[in-house]
Amino acid sequence: MLLNHRFLYWALNCAFAWALLSFSHPAAALPLNVSANFSGAEYGTADMSLVNGGGSGAFWVTDPGISPPFGLNERLRVSSNAGGQRGNAWYNPTTVVAAGDWTFDFTMQITYPTGSGADGMAFHMQEVGVGADTFIQGQGLGTDFLSVTFDTYNNFDSCSVDFGLAVFNNGSQVGSCVDLSSVGSPDPYAYSVGLAHNEATGNLSVTVTNTNSGATTGALNYTVDLSALDTATFGWSAQTGGDGENHDVVNFDATFAIPEPSTALLLGLGLAGLAVRRQRIR
């Protein structure tokens, strides 16, 4: 019993010292790095929760894909090239603080369109969780979410172009649609997408690059409000509508800032340790 008291006394005094130190040295942010290669080691990984929104939904594929120089035979297919398809794929091991500083890079393929092409695909950050079933503009994701959409059907809604980028934040479109035809049509290319959020300014930078030709949009900047997304799930959705095309994700690599415990919490623990110390002195 005495040993337990001594251990508690030692632990609380350590917390007290940590709290005092935090006043002169503000809490830093620890990086959380997450990545997956769906054409390699993470093909079929249980870290992705696949939600069927219609048709065959999201699934893992080993078809030849697009022609060289890509040669990718294993990928995560969010929806396939047929009418009436919709799928979702969510990373399930952890949630992230979307309001902080972060970067997120991924490679996508949009291939084998039929008819006039399908609706498109999107990257999302949301708090509904790994069971969410959404459309590319984030419908059904509640009041707080981010959707970076790649619209491949000119139906005069958010993007009146054949291949465009639109950003939706908390249900509203941010800025205007960006025509992506300058980086190449959606087929048969693969695209590298780079996202970066700055906590201090609320700026979201989006860059889309054709992995074959190197053609790029450069950094496109949007002001977004992610303050409520402190336990965000990230992933993708895709849908085809009346026509079809494959929507695939090849890989992703991301870094998020995870705040350390607040100074107030540390101070509380430190004061508790001081109280125990005073009782022992008496």
Image: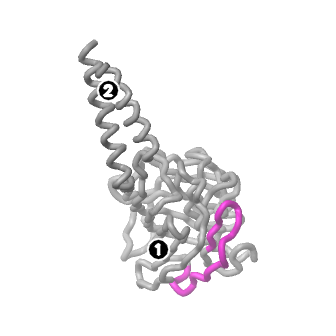
Q: Position of residue 79 (x, y in %)?
A: 58, 59
Quarter of image, res 34: bottom left
Toward the right, the furthest residue is 156
Distance of mark 2 from mark 1, alpha carbons?
A: 60 Å
The majority secondary structure of the magenta stretch comes to strand
Viewer-closest of 48 and 80: 48
Would residue 255 be visible to someone looking at this image?
A: yes
Viewer-closest of 119 and 114: 119
- Residue at image point 71% right, 73% down: 158
Q: Position of residue 173 (x, y in %)?
A: 69, 70
The residue type indicated by label 2 comes to Arg
Q: Secondary structure at mark 2?
A: helix
Q: Secondary structure at mark 1?
A: strand
Residue 175: within the magenta? yes
Q: Position of residue 215 (x, y in %)?
A: 45, 85
Q: Around disc 1, counting alpha carbons within 10 Å, would you say few (fewer than 14), some (14 to 19), or many (20 or more)?
A: many
The answer to whether marks 2 and 1 mark residues whose Cβ atoms lie closer than 8 Å is no
Disc on res. 277: 2
Disc on res. 191: 1
Q: Nearest to the eye among marks 2 and 1: give it.
A: 2
Magenta part of the chain? 166-185
Say left or right for 140 vs 2.
right
The residue type indicated by label 1 comes to Tyr
- Residue at image point 38% right, 55% down: 26
Q: Is residue 85 above or below residue 158?
A: above
Looking at the rendered image, the quarter that the N terminus falls into is top left
Q: Position of residue 49 (x, y in %)?
A: 51, 46
- Residue at image point 39% right, 66% down: 72
Sequence-wise, the earlier of marks 2 and 1 is: 1
Would residue 121 be visible to someone looking at this image?
A: no
Toward the front, the furthest residue is 282
Residue 255: within the magenta? no
